[in-house]
């Protein structure tokens, strides 16, 4: 196992890159900009998927699957949408390879596609072209569909989980009879994401609206959840879009209303991606490795035997079997690591690096005394306790660890949220402290762009239920009714 990580305070970016690879979450592939998600990393993503998938089904959605390839002509139907994705699209132009006679494989120029195909960057266009055949009447609505898929957005600078050319995600696409229904759907799905982030990922988030400049291409309104990472930068952890009738008009999707009128359908789309893995790592982990909230940890409890000889190991293993049977009944995931190829100290460091919430160490003395050593990953504390009622202790401790991880992140965000009233103060906080900055803005895209150009800070969101207060824009001095949240971001 690799030794030590770079400290977060020395080089946060390097710490992150090392942690992703050393904790066996993911690695760079031989395809530039694409990653291999390793089994341990994928098992965390599977837990995320399972929770979210159930939440989608509980809110009435069904899963479907749509093609990876989208005809280029579909993109030209919604102008703002194509503008938003044009520079990131991978294009398929040919459908065959051939041998050039010298042992080289080349593209067969005679096998050119009549129409180029775009490798899916997002699926609004192909889905709305499909919905045209599904919707005739108000009786066909609403359509509440989600798909789990991979998407491709060509990236020049990539970072594992945070920004890769290909990534995994889910994308919901819904169709409604009224604007009110569609907006309620977009709000509901934002709440689903926020609940998942806070109660499963133990990551506090701000819910809000994106500005017109930051909206999804083709949306009338984009709702988002924004989280704060330990280096004081923001990360957009999920978005939900009210698309109005833009895509229905582009693809001529109409329905006969109860009154017999022909009307265009109202739409939403919403999604989260493997970027959540990056958020999970950066929100909680420390210089020793991952810190995983128990609800998403693939292994919640690891048991390491400390023994002299096979006889003692067999006695320990008999007692461990009693413990693991009880853990199984409680639905607590565990691993009994009795490998004889590694010493206990190595195993302790390995599971600390991988973020396992609870570690049990079981030795010869524990056999005699009916005890066991229990260590917490979040606080890195340990104590020796009685094995009586052990599983009840573990169950309570997992809940406590989940809450503690959330509280630590919440307190950090509170400490790193600053109100400013001038542009100089804004720049000073941005440079010296970072975090979320609450400031007045005059509401114009020009001022927003100026701030971004001069400081690289963006408006992360206009918080929902935002406090209304009289103020003046930090840049122009024009009147403002509320503060918005700025930050440097991933």
Image (cartoon, helix red, strand yellow):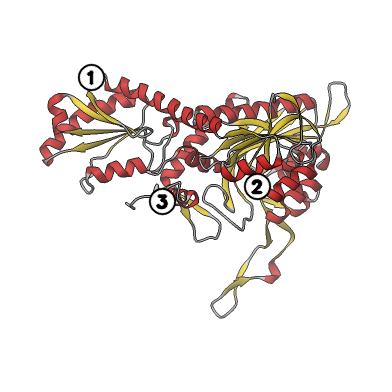
Residue 223 in picture, x, y percent from top left: 69, 33
Residue 302 in sight: yes
Query: What mark, if any, has residue 388 been given in the picture?
Result: 1
Label 3 vs label 1: CA separation?
40 Å
How crowded is the residue under tag 1: few (<14 C-alpha within 10 Å), some, or many (20+)? few
Determine whether, in the image, residue 373 is placed left or right of residue 271. left
Element assignment for label 2: loop
Q: Observer-nearest residue: 65 or 212?
A: 212
How crowded is the residue under tag 2: few (<14 C-alpha within 10 Å), some, or many (20+)? few
x 45%, y 30%: residue: 405
Query: What mark, if any, has residue 67 been given in the picture?
Result: 2
Label 3 vs label 2: CA separation?
42 Å
Element assignment for label 3: loop
Residue 88's place in the image compared with 320, above or below, is below
Query: What mark, if any, has residue 6 been given in the picture?
Result: 3
Residue 24 in picture, x, y percent from top left: 40, 48
Of the image marks 3 and 2, the number of the one nearer the N terminus: 3
Residue 260 in picture, x, y percent from top left: 88, 24
x 39%, y 50%: residue: 5
Total labels: the figure holds: 3
Determine whether, in the image, residue 96 is placed left or right of residue 216. left
x 55%, y 41%: residue: 232
Label 1 vs label 2: CA separation?
55 Å
Element assignment for label 1: loop
Of the image marks 3 and 1, the number of the one nearer the N terminus: 3
Task: Using the rendered view, name the quadrant where residue 480 is placed.
Answer: top right
Determine whether, in the image, residue 314 is placed left or right of residue 323. left
Residue 173 in sight: no
x 60%, y 28%: residue: 192
Query: What mark, if any, has residue 261 been given in the picture?
Result: none
């Amino acid at each position: 196992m690799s030794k030590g990580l770079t400290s977060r305070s020395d080089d946060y970016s390097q710490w992150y890159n090392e942690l992703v690879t050393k904790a066996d979450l993911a690695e760079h592939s031989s395809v530039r900009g694409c990653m291999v998600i390793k089994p341990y990393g994928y098992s965390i993503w599977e837990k995320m998927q399972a929770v979210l998938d159930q939440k989608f089904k509980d809110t009435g959605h069904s899963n479907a699957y749509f093609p990876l390839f989208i005809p280029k002509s579909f993109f030209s139907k919604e102008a703002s949408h194509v503008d938003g994705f044009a520079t990131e699209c991978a294009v398929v132009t040919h459908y065959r390879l051939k041998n050039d006679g010298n042992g080289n494989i080349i593209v067969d120029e005679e096998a050119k596609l009549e129409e180029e195909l775009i490798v899916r960057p997002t699926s609004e266009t192909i889905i709305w072209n499909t919905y045209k055949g599904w919707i005739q009447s108000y009786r066909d609505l609403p359509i509440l569909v989600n798909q789990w898929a991979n998407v491709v957005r060509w990236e020049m600078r990539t970072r594992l989980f945070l920004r890769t050319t290909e990534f995994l995600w889910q994308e919901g696409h819904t169709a409604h009879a009224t604007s009110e229904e569609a907006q309620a759907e977009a709000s509901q799905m934002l709440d689903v994401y926020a609940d998942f982030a806070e109660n499963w990922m133990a990551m506090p988030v701000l819910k809000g609206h994106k500005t017109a400049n930051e909206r999804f291409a083709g949306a009338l309104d984009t709702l988002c959840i924004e989280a704060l990472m330990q280096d004081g930068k923001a990360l957009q952890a999920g978005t939900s879009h009210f698309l109005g009738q833009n895509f229905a008009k582009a693809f001529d999707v109409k329905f006969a209303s109860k009154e017999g009128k022909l009307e265009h359908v109202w739409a939403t789309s919403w999604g989260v991606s493997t970027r959540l893995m990056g958020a999970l790592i950066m929100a909680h982990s420390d210089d020793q490795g991952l810190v995983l909230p128990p609800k998403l940890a693939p292994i919640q409890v690891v048991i390491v035997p400390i023994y002299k000889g096979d006889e003692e190991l067999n006695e320990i293993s008999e007692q461990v079997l009693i413990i693991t049977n009880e853990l199984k009944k409680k639905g607590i995931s565990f691993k009994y690591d009795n490998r004889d190829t590694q010493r206990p100290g190595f195993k302790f460091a390995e599971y600390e690096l991988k973020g396992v919430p609870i570690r049990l160490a079981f030795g010869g003395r524990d056999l005699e005394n009916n005890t066991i050593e229990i260590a917490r990953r979040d606080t890195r504390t340990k104590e020796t306790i009685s094995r009586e009622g052990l599983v009840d202790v573990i169950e309570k401790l997992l809940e406590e660890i989940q809450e503690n991880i959330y509280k630590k992140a919440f307190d950090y965000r509170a400490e790193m949220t600053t109100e400013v009233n001038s542009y100089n103060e804004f720049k000073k906080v941005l440079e010296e402290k970072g975090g979320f900055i609450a400031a007045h803005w005059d509401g114009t895209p020009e001022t927003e762009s100026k701030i971004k150009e001069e400081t690289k800070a963006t408006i992360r969101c206009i918080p929902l239920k935002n406090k209304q207060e009289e103020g003046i824009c930090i840049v122009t001095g024009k009147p403002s009714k509320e503060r918005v949240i700025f930050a440097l971001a991933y």
